[in-house]
């Protein structure tokens, strides 16, 4: 892939031009690209080119064509794709990803109008987190529109890294609002990432009025949180550690804080919980069948 990065937005071997246009179809940015790269990453582009060549010169997918004389008999098509109503910075980042397997966050400089130096520094840091979180959300939504699942995964991973440091800021809540405004997808990768972070810090986050509003306003967010709670519930050992009964090999819940003895409810024996095998030592399924779940 390293060699491919040098072809990002260059005319070398380029066989398609992408024009980012505004509502009046005025061109804001023109990007040189390669059909094979676009199609290998994005199903949307694959369909766009497919339709273009099936329906000839119709305006499907806003594709137009420009004839370029190569020799007297043959005319090669160098299509232009007009992309309208998209966030230009996000689009460029997506294109960058096609060629480099990564993208940079394009957010501009954070601004703030705080009085004291200390709070100003904090404010700028928070603003920077906020812009990054929003950028990753927009990349995620764009990757959804253009059907690029690998970019969605990358955006969710990058989001998680920033959110680990900034889950307590207003920017994190803004990012949640942005995600569920842009996508209706339930149990998506970004939704799961957010739900995991919210669940980790639920004691503080669930107290926030803004968080309660978000849950009321976006049922999909509420659903994602519920699914996360269920996942956590299923993978946790209620009331303690799961240890294997030395006699019947069933797993029972044992609380290390209370007694050193664990009691098996199946065969009734008591055994030493500290020396008994846990689920990971026994290489057993994390959730034993003897424990009922939802
Ligand atoms: Zn037993």
Image (tube, rainbow, N blue to C red):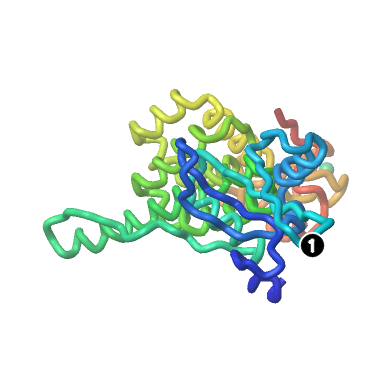
Q: Residue furthest front?
A: 72
Q: Residue 158 in the image: x percent, y percent?
A: 54, 57
Look at the image and tell me whether residue 237 can be seen: no
Look at the image and tell me whether residue 139 can be seen: yes
Residue at 51% from the left image edge and 51% from the top image edge:
90
Residue at 57% from the left image edge and 47% from the top image edge:
140
Q: Quadrant of the N terminus?
A: bottom right
Q: Please indicate whether residue 154 sits to the left or right of residue 172 in the image.
A: right
Query: What secondary structure is found at the residue carrying circle 1?
Result: loop
Q: Residue 284 in the image: x percent, y percent?
A: 82, 51
Q: Please indicate whether residue 246 sits to the left or right of residue 122 in the image.
A: right
Q: Quadrant of residue 103?
A: bottom right
Observer-nearest of 29 and 174: 29
Observer-nearest of 237 and 26: 26
Q: Quadrant of the C terminus?
A: top right
**Mark 1, other Cα within 10 Å: few <14 / some 14–19 / many ≥20:** few
Looking at the rendering, the quadrant in which ligand 1 lies is top right
Q: Is residue 89 above or below residue 223?
A: below
Q: Is residue 181 above or below residue 65?
A: above
Q: Residue 159 in the image: x percent, y percent?
A: 52, 53
Residue at 51% from the left image edge and 59% from the top image edge:
161
Residue at 50% from the left image edge and 44% from the top image edge:
21
Observer-nearest of 130 and 11: 11
Q: Is residue 145 above or below residue 6?
A: above
Q: Residue 71 in the image: x percent, y percent?
A: 79, 62
Q: Residue furthest bottom?
A: 3
Q: Quadrant of residue 96?
A: bottom right
Q: Please indicate whether residue 130 sits to the left or right of residue 267 in the image.
A: left
Q: Residue furthest right?
A: 248
Residue picked out by circle 1: 71
């Amino acid at each position: 892939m390293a060699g491919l990065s040098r072809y990002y937005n260059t005319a070398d071997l380029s066989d398609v031009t992408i024009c980012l246009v505004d509502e009046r179809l005025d061109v804001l940015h023109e990007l040189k690209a390669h059909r094979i790269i676009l199609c290998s990453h994005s199903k949307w582009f694959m369909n766009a080119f497919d339709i273009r060549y099936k329906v000839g010169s119709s305006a499907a997918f806003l594709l137009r064509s420009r004839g370029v004389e190569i020799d007297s008999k043959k005319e090669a098509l160098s299509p232009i794709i007009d992309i309208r109503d998209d966030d230009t910075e996000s689009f460029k980042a997506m294109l960058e990803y096609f060629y480099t397997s990564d993208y940079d966050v394009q957010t501009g400089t954070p601004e703030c109008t705080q009085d004291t130096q200390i709070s100003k520094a904090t404010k700028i840091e928070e603003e920077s987190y906020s812009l990054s979180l929003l950028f990753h959300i927009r990349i995620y939504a764009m990757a959804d529109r253009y059907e690029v699942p690998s970019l969605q995964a990358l955006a969710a991973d990058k989001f998680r890294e920033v959110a680990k440091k900034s889950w307590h800021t207003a920017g994190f809540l803004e990012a949640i609002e942005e995600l569920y405004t842009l996508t209706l997808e339930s149990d998506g990768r970004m939704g799961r990432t957010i739900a995991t972070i919210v669940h980790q810090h639920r004691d503080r986050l669930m107290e926030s009025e803004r968080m309660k509003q978000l849950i009321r306003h976006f049922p999909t967010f509420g659903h994602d949180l519920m699914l996360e709670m269920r996942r956590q519930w299923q993978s946790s050992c209620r009331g303690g550690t799961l240890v294997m009964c030395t006699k019947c090999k069933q797993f029972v819940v044992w609380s290390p804080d209370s007694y050193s003895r664990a009691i098996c409810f199946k065969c009734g024996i008591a055994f030493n919980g500290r020396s008994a095998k846990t689920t990971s030592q026994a290489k057993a399924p994390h959730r034993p069948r003897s424990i009922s779940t939802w």
